[in-house]
Amino acid sequence: MSTAQPTGVVVPEVDGRTSTSALGRGVVADALRAVDPVGARGAESSTDWRHDYLQHFRRLVEAGLPSRDAALTIARDGLASLHTRMRFRPEPGAAEEPLDAAFKGGAPLSTATVAGSGKVRRELVVPYRGRRLRGPELDRQLDTWVAGGVIERSCADAVRTVAANPDWLALPGRRVAVLGAGAEMGPVTALLSWGADVVAVDLPRPAIWQRLIGTAERYGGRLHVPVAADAGGDLDQRAGADLLHDLGRIAEWLAGLDGDLVLGNYVYADGALNVRVATAVDALTVWLRERRPDLALAFLATPTDVFAVPADAVDEAGRRYREAAGIGRIRRPLRVLSAGRLLHRNYPPGIYPGVNDSLVPQQGPNYALAKRLQRWRAAEARAAGVPVSLTVAPATRTRSVVRNRLLAAAFAGAHRFGIEVFEPATSNTLMAALLVHDLHAGRPEHEHPWQDEAYAAAHGGLWRQPYSARSALGIAVLLGIGAARG
C-alpha cells in the first residue's frame, strides 16, 4: 500500500490509496471469469495476495489448456481488464484519467543516429564460459544443452538455422526498436555487432546513453536515438524519453520511422513500477498496431513462471526422478523432515501437457503480472496475424537478480538439480539469434498458444528436472550459501 501520488501511467487509487494487490486480484479475476468463474471468485476473495497469487497465476494457465479459445479468452480479458483499470496522471495533484490520455501531445522528438565504425560480424558467435562458440563447437554445445535438458531441441534447431544463414544477422530492411535498451537481457549489443539498425528507447539518464553510444561506436550497426528537438549539449545529455510520462511523444516518434519496425519489449523495473512500465509498453503496442501494419513484436518470457510443457519433457523429468542420484538418494527423509514440502516430483506421470510451475515467491506478484501481460499480448497478437517472437529465456545472472540474496544463493546451488544459470552475454546472444530466426524463418503454426510458448524455449533445465522448482528452492539456497562461503 502507498499514499504517494506518482505521475504518468499509474496504478489506480481506491479510497485514496494505490494497491497493486487489488489491481492484481482484479485483473486475474477478470481474466478467469468467462472461462473459470470459480477460479475468478477465488482470486477476488484472496486476503493475502502476496502469498496466494502463486496458485491463481497457475490457474490462469490450467484454465486455458482445454482449448485455444479458452486460452485466448483469458489473454484478451486480462489485457482488457488491465487497460480499463490502469490510469494516467499528467502532473502531481491532478485527477486520474483513462490510460488513453497518456497519448496526448507533447513536444515532438527528433532522431540522432550513431553509425558504428567497427567491423560487422558475419558469423554467429556465442560467448560462453570464456570461449567464443562458432561452427562445430557451437553445434556440440547445443547438443550438450539439449542432452542436459537445458534447452528444447527446437531452440537448438533454430540457432543452427541462423548460424547457417549469416546474412540474416543484420536484419536488412528492418529496424528493431528496443524498449529498455539499457537492460542486461536486451539484444542491443548483439544486433549492433551484426550490423543491424537498432532504435533505442530508455530513460533520459546520461549514464545509460554513454554506455549505449559507446557500444554503437564500437560495432558496425546504427543506433537511432530519440532526442528533444530543442535540447543542447552532448548526445548523452539529450537522449532518451520516459515511457511512463512521454508515451505520446515516443509513440509519434516510432510511428514516423522508416523501414519495417520490430517492437521489442525488454523493460524491467522493481515492484509496482514494473507493472506501470509494462502497462505503458502494452498501451504503446496497441497504439502502434493501429498505425503500422508492418509492426512485429518481440518479447522474452521468464522461465520462473507457469508454462504448459510437452509430453517428452514430462517423461524425461519422470525418468530423472526415478533415477535420481545425489540429493535424490535422501529425498525420502528430506520429505519426512519437511512435512512433505521438499523435493516434489515436477509432474504427475502420464498427464499431458504437463504444467511446470516455477514461480519464485521472492520475485513477487507484480513481476508475475508484468510478465504474464507480455505473454497475453503475444498470444492475442499472434492470433490476430501479427508476427510475434516470444522466447522463454534462461535464468541469467543479471544485476537485478543477484541483488536478491536468496535468489543469488539459489542460482549458485541450482546446478545440483540440473539447472544451468547463464551469464548475460550468453543469454543476450542466444536470444538475439532466436529473434533473427523468428523474423526471417517465422515460427511453425500450432493448435494452441501453450505450444507457441514452448517452441524454442531455453528454460535452463527447469522444465526437465526431476523436482518442482519451489520444492527444491530451499535446498538450492542452502547449497548455494555453502558454496559461496567455501
Image: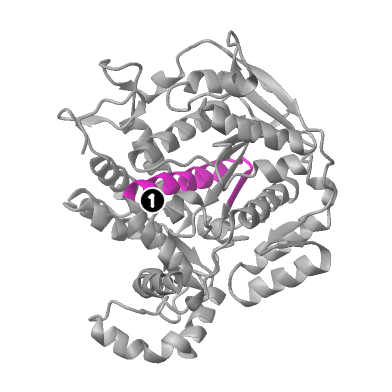
Residue 418 visible: yes
Residue type at mark 1: give it: Ala
Vertical order, 218 against 33 (above or below): above
At 25% across and 87% down in the image, what residue appears?
336
At 37% across and 54% down in the image, what residue appears?
363
Q: Which residue is mark 1?
A: 368
Is 346 colored magenta in this rendering? Answer: no
Is 375 colored magenta in this rendering? Answer: yes
Protein image colouring: one colour
Q: Identify the image quadrant of the N terminus.
A: top left
Residue 132, image x, y percentages:
75, 60
Observer-nearest of 367 and 222: 222
Indicate left or right for 417 with 299 as reference. left
Vertical order, 391 against 240 (above or below): below
Range covered by the magenta-colored residues: 365-390
Residue 307, image x, y percentages:
46, 61
At 52% across and 76% down in the image, what residue appears?
418
Residue 314, image x, y percentages:
50, 76
Vertical order, 160 against 399 (above or below): below
